[in-house]
Image (cartoon, helix red, strand yellow):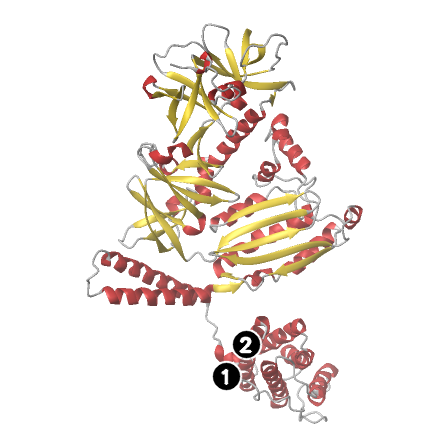
């Protein structure tokens, strides 16, 4: 049987039980107005829900009973044995119909015409004012054809006997007690560590198993289908589509997916805004859709599914997608970006602007949009739940907004970490992996234009020192000291949280943060460890925002992309090239396009080795060949420009690194020397622009004939 229909039958039976009692009571106390109101509301609720399930017979009986009760409420039909008896007979028929539905999963057939006629006659008597109190039953017989029998075919107890309504307050109190039991279990488990021969070991193990089973059972009482929060959306979609002159079809998938009641309540407002936003900004008007070769009716799909310990909710439309040109224009108009910077932003970066506080692309303020209070509120509200929001879009094909939220906020598995002698918990739902940084993999940590990052499988993750965000006094750890990086997911991005130690994982009971630290933005709650310590639960999204790591990385990567492109645009519109200036020998200064520079290093002469006729240095687990750019002596520190073409890397030994400049590069045509692309005027001086590919070829001996001597320019010592 459909879950909604089951709930309806259970609720109706509860109503009917209460009506039986109240009807008998008001027959003795006709002045009990509140009791009569309760009866009327119960019958009215039954009638109102019948249309949803297509229960026409039940609806007719309930409607007739409601009419009689309405006249009793307004005083036109006096409460008397005749009128009370008529309502009770209608209630009996409702019981029989409900029993038949429960037994056969469909509404039973039956002839209720006689009973309905009697109820209508009572209403007519009241309306005509002939007699407020009928002395006897109306002329029509007071009998109804019995409904189909419900008992045959029913297995086990009735639905009403299988369920019990409990107040939310009791469930919350029970959940808190289970949480305390989990804490006690953790404390006992902590005490038993290292004492395998303890006589209490078996009992503690049994307590742990029972606690886990009880915890799971109580958690289920808090779970509700996410479809419960979608009930108002069809009407919302209809009203929003009408207001904007659009034709929108709503599809809902996965409404049976269960989620914690607390999260379900907190999710309603963000979800409502996302749906309205998709209709207002995403789906086009019918004429525009037809012109674009689309169906006149737009499609909006709301879906939910469970992945591990998370619920994934998606709001997908088949509209026009994000208008990136409008986003750029609005960002320039509001002074968020210079025009040149805005033109260089990619689609992913422009989408992030949509989540900026107060940002809106609406041309005017309407009931649906334009106030600038929207996507930033959606993201912040979801992040408070320990979740994340992602938006993807394709021009002309639509957008998808994806919300990731945990199943529950009450008891969650967490990773316990340490920093500067203090312990913290990180919910495992936010942790993607753990990386140990030491001498062996120190090369994974880099500085990109001032941003400390971790290179992980080709991606650059901004690193955040936990102590810097929380104000803990501790020296910055180097790779030689060793530290851990907890990789956490923040929206579509990831950040690496630097911690000093990692302890273990355990289930923690989430308690709300105190008033004094509520505004810090780095914590989502507190918990108690097995050893009795009270520790803070970290909010990865809040830490990323406080540190500015993602924004810093975005700016750094933008500079890096500009460098890799080799050109930027000045305010005057001229194409500029970023150059690294250096001296090599006594001749003119030299320059390398910054796009060809991987890193700048400095080596002591003692680290330079000779092998295969080449100068080599051990560098990040490999041998890096060195090539002299001038005639510098081998005394003192060796300044090296590391360059790579993706497959090969070499170090260009220079005399002195001077500066990084941006200039309009104009190579003078004419003579070309070995390894020189040409000569240009840089900072008022004639400067040789180096061809790094030439030095890469020399470093790896490419182009040399067998037995040919290694050129002097390749010999460093």
Give how far across and how far down residue 559 sits, in percent: 53, 27
Mark 1 vs 2, N-terminal side: 2
In the figure, residue 297 lies in which quadrant?
bottom right
**Residue 320 in the image: above or below residue 564:** below
Give the left or right position of residue 526, taking residue 354 as reference: left
Give the left or right position of residue 21, taking residue 623 as reference: right
**Residue 670 in the image: above or below residue 379:** above
Give how far across and how far down residue 1 sits, in percent: 58, 75
> Which quarter of the image is occupied by the C terminus?
top left
Residue at the front extreme of this rendering? 707
Res 374 visible: no
Neighbour class for label 1 at 10 Å: few (<14), some, many (≥20)?
few
Give how far across and how far down residue 318 sits, in percent: 69, 50
Task: Give the residue at mark 1.
Answer: 156
Task: Give the residue at mark 2.
Answer: 10
Residue found 59% across the figure and 87% down from its top: 150
**Residue 260 in the image: above or below residue 617:** below
């Amino acid at each position: 049987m459909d879950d909604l229909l089951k709930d309806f039958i259970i609720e109706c039976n509860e109503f009917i039980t209460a009506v039986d009692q109240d009807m008998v009571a008001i027959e003795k106390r006709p002045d009990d107005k509140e009791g009569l109101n309760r009866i009327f509301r119960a019958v009215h609720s039954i009638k109102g829900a019948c249309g949803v399930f297509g229960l026409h017979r039940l609806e007719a009986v309930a409607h007739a009973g409601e009419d009689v009760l309405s006249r009793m409420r307004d005083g036109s039909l006096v409460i008397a044995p005749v009128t009370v008896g008529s309502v009770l007979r209608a209630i009996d028929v409702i019981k029989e119909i409900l029993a038949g539905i429960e037994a056969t999963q469909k509404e039973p057939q039956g002839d209720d015409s006689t009973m309905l006629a009697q109820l209508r006659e009572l209403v007519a008597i009241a309306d005509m004012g002939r007699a407020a109190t009928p002395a006897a039953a109306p002329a029509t017989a007071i009998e109804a054809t019995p409904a189909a029998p419900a008992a045959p075919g029913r297995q086990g107890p009735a639905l009403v006997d299988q369920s019990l309504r409990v107040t939310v307050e009791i469930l919350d109190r029970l959940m808190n007690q289970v949480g305390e039991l989990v804490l006690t279990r953790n404390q006992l488990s902590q005490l038993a560590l290292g004492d395998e021969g303890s006589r209490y070991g078996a009992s503690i193990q049994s307590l742990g198993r029972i606690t886990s089973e009880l915890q799971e059972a109580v958690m289920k009482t808090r779970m509700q289908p996410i479809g419960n929060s979608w009930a108002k959306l069809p009407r919302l979609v209809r009203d929003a589509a009408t207001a904007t002159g659009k034709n929108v079809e709503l599809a809902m998938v996965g409404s049976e997916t269960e989620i914690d009641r607390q999260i379900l309540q907190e999710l309603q407002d963000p979800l409502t805004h996302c749906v309205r936003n998709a209709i207002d900004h995403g789906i086009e008007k019918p004429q525009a859709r037809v012109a674009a070769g689309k169906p006149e009716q737009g499609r909006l799909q709301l879906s939910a599914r469970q992945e591990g310990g998370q619920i994934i909710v998606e709001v997908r439309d088949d509209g026009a997608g994000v208008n990136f040109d409008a986003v750029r224009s609005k960002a320039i108009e509001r002074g968020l970006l210079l025009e040149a910077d805005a033109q260089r932003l990619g689609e992913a970066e422009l989408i992030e602007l949509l989540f900026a506080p107060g940002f809106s692309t609406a041309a005017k303020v309407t009931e649906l949009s334009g106030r600038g209070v929207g996507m930033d509120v959606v993201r912040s509200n979801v992040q408070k739940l320990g979740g994340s929001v992602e938006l993807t879009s394709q021009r002309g094909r639509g957008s998808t907004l994806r919300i990731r939220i945990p199943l529950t906020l009450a008891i969650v598995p967490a990773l316990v970490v340490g920093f500067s002698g203090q312990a913290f918990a990180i919910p495992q739902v936010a942790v993607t992996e753990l990386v140990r940084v030491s001498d062996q993999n120190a090369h994974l940590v880099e500085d990109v234009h001032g941003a400390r990052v971790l290179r992980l499988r080709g991606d650059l993750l901004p690193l955040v020192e936990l102590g810097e965000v929380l104000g803990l006094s501790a020296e910055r750890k180097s790779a030689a000291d060793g530290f851990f990086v907890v990789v956490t997911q923040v929206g579509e991005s990831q950040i690496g949280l630097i911690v000093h130690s990692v302890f273990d994982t355990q289930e923690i009971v989430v308690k709300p943060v105190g008033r004094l630290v509520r505004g810090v933005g780095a914590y989502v709650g507190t918990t108690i460890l097995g050893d009795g310590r009270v520790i803070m639960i970290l909010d990865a999204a809040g830490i990323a925002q406080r540190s500015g790591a993602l924004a810093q990385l975005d700016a750094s990567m933008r500079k890096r992309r500009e460098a890799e492109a080799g050109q930027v645009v000045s305010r005057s519109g001229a194409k500029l090239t970023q150059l690294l200036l250096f001296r090599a020998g006594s001749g003119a200064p030299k320059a390398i396009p910054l796009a060809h520079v991987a890193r700048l290093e400095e080596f002591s002469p003692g680290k330079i080795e000779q092998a295969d006729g080449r100068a080599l240095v051990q560098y990040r687990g490999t041998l890096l060949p060195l090539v002299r750019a001038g005639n510098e002596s081998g005394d003192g520190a060796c300044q090296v420009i590391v360059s790579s073409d993706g497959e090969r890397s070499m170090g260009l030994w220079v005399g002195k690194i001077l500066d990084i400049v941006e200039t309009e590069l104009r190579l003078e045509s004419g003579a070309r020397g070995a390894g020189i692309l040409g000569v240009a005027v840089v900072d008022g001086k004639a400067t040789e622009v180096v061809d790094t590919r030439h030095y890469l070829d020399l470093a790896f001996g490419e182009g040399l004939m067998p037995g040919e001597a290694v050129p002097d320019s390749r010999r460093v010592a």
